[in-house]
Image (tube, helix red, strand yellow):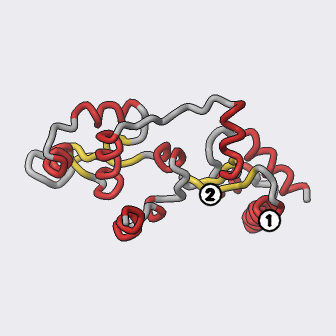
């Protein structure tokens, strides 16, 4: 019981997702399997209890979050930092998320317009980052999404992105 309470306190006080690896390293007084089991049990208990809070796996870690059912109520009291992306920003972000790492030239070709401004804004908002040099003519810089992107959109990893078929089904 004590270990679950310790993990609960850590998750409650952390503004960022906390990875299991980090927890086991910092909670070295406890066997790693016990830490993993306690985290799993705690996550299930929060989900099953119907509490307003859940422990969600996002961006490679675990984080306490408000249950989505209460979002409307919470926003009445807490000013949420609005991500506020325009259609063109969402378009560029989507291209990068699905095709990463990808060069600016490739993004521009897909969109048919210059994407410099959108890329600059997405970099400033830490939703994308430089992803190294690509093996292409001139060795252009590639762009990829960040952990902040995963956290902002509540994704564990990129595999959680909807497939093209799922997106098309929404449009029907």
* Residue on which disc 1 sits: 48
Nearest to N terminus: mark 1 or mark 2 = 1
Task: Return the mark for residue 123.
Answer: none
Residue located 52% across and 56% down the image: 155
Viewed as shown, does residue 110 lie left or right of 35? left
Contact between labelled residues 2 and 1, with CB atoms less than 8 Å apart:
no
Viewed as shown, does residue 110 lie left or right of 56? left
What is the distance, in whole Å, between disc 1 and disc 2 at their CAs? 16 Å
- SS at mark 2? strand
Q: Where is residue 150 in the image (x, y as percent from the top left)?
A: 49, 50
The reply to whether residue 31 is visible in this rendering is no
Q: Which numbered disc, 1 or 2, marks the residue closer to the eye? A: 1
Q: Residues within 10 Å of mark 1 (few under 14, many from 20)?
A: few
Q: In this view, does 53 lie above or below 160?
A: above
Q: Where is residue 23 in the image (x, y as percent from the top left)?
A: 70, 53
Q: Where is residue 43 in the image (x, y as percent from the top left)?
A: 75, 61
Q: In which quarter of the image is the C terminus?
A: bottom left
Q: Is residue 137 above or below residue 130?
A: below
Q: Where is residue 159 in the image (x, y as percent from the top left)?
A: 45, 65
Q: Quadrant of the N terminus?
A: bottom right
Residue located 51% across and 49% down the image: 153
Spot the residue most to the front. Answer: 172
Quarter of the image where one finds residue 79: top right
Q: Residues within 10 Å of mark 2 (few under 14, many from 20)?
A: many
* Residue on which disc 2 sits: 57
Report how many numbered discs are placed on residues in the image: 2
Viewed as shown, does residue 163 lie left or right of 38? left
Residue located 81% across and 54% down the image: 51
- SS at mark 1? helix
Spot the residue most to the right. Answer: 1
């Amino acid at each position: 019981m004590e270990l679950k309470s310790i993990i609960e306190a850590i998750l409650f006080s952390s503004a960022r997702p906390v990875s299991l690896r980090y927890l086991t390293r910092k909670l070295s007084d406890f066997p790693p399997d016990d830490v993993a089991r306690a985290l799993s049990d705690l996550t299930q208990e929060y989900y099953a209890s119907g509490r307003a809070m859940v422990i969600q796996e996002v961006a490679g870690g675990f984080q306490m979050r408000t249950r989505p059912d209460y979002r409307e109520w919470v926003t009445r009291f807490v000013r949420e930092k609005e991500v506020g992306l325009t259609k063109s920003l969402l378009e560029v972000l989507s291209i990068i998320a699905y095709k990463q790492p990808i060069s600016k030239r490739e993004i521009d070709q897909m969109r048919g317009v210059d994407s410099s401004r959108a890329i600059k804004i997405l970099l400033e908002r830490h939703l994308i980052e430089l992803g190294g040099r690509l093996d292409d003519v001139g060795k252009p810089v590639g762009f990829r999404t960040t952990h902040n992107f995963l956290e902002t959109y509540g994704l564990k990893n990129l595999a959680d992105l909807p497939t093209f078929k799922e997106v098309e089904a929404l449009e029907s």
